[in-house]
Amino acid sequence: IRESTDLNIKFSAASICVQTTLWKLDDFDETTGKYFITIGGNEGNPGRETISNWFKIEKFERDYKLVYCPTVCNFCKVICKDIGIFIQDGTRRLALSDVPFK
């Protein structure tokens, strides 16, 4: 596993969705106070225009965790946080978190 390297993550399964299955960081959700991970990102082309599409795998204790902390744009200001599970009304969603999902 390549650790601490910017990478795109996408589902390989077929989808009926019009948008891509590539992960991206969505805009801040004011109702929950969270940044959620959604699909619809653009693959490749590292830079400011695709900054929300880049994630990393980091070693965490004896496991691995997913992190949003892209370094594909040297002058962009980004939030660096772990990706964890946010549960609301029984629905589990990936979101930026202080508690990583491992």
Image: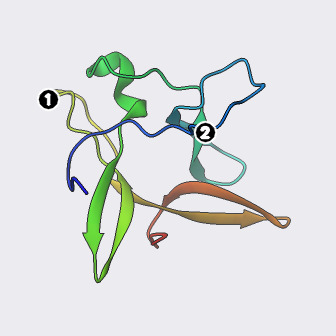
Q: Which mark is residue 38?
A: 2
Residue 72 position, x and y percent, is 21, 30
Q: How is the image coloured?
A: rainbow
| On screen, residue 78 above or below 67 | above
Q: Which mark is residue 6?
A: none
Looking at the image, which residue is at 85% across and 65% down? 89
Q: Around disc 2, counting alpha carbons within 10 Å, would you say few (fewer than 14), some (14 to 19), or many (20 or more)?
A: some
From the viewer's perspective, tell me whether residue 20 is left or right of residue 49.
right
1 or 68: which is nearer to us?
1
Alpha carbon separation for disc pair 2 and 1: 24 Å
Q: Quadrant of the N terminus?
A: bottom left
CB of mark 2 within 8 Å of CB of mark 1? no
| On screen, residue 66 above or below 35 | below
Secondary structure of the residue carrying tag 2 is strand
- Residue furthest left as drawn: 74
Q: Earlier in the sequence, mark 2 or mark 1?
A: 2
Q: Amino acid at mark 1?
A: Asn
Looking at the image, which residue is at 45% across and 72% down? 102
From the viewer's perspective, tell me whether residue 76 is left or right of residue 8.
left
Q: Nearer the viewer, mark 2 or mark 1?
A: 2
From the viewer's perspective, tell me whether residue 2 is left or right of residue 94.
left
Residue identifier under label 1: 74
Residue 14 position, x and y percent, is 68, 31
Q: Amino acid at mark 2?
A: Thr
Q: Around disc 1, counting alpha carbons within 10 Å, would you say few (fewer than 14), some (14 to 19), or many (20 or more)?
A: few
Quadrant assignment, res 81: bottom left
Looking at the image, which residue is at 21% across and 56% down? 3
- Residue furthest bottom as drawn: 62
Q: How many marks?
A: 2
29 or 85: which is nearer to us?
85
Quadrant assignment, res 65: bottom left
Residue 38 position, x and y percent, is 61, 39
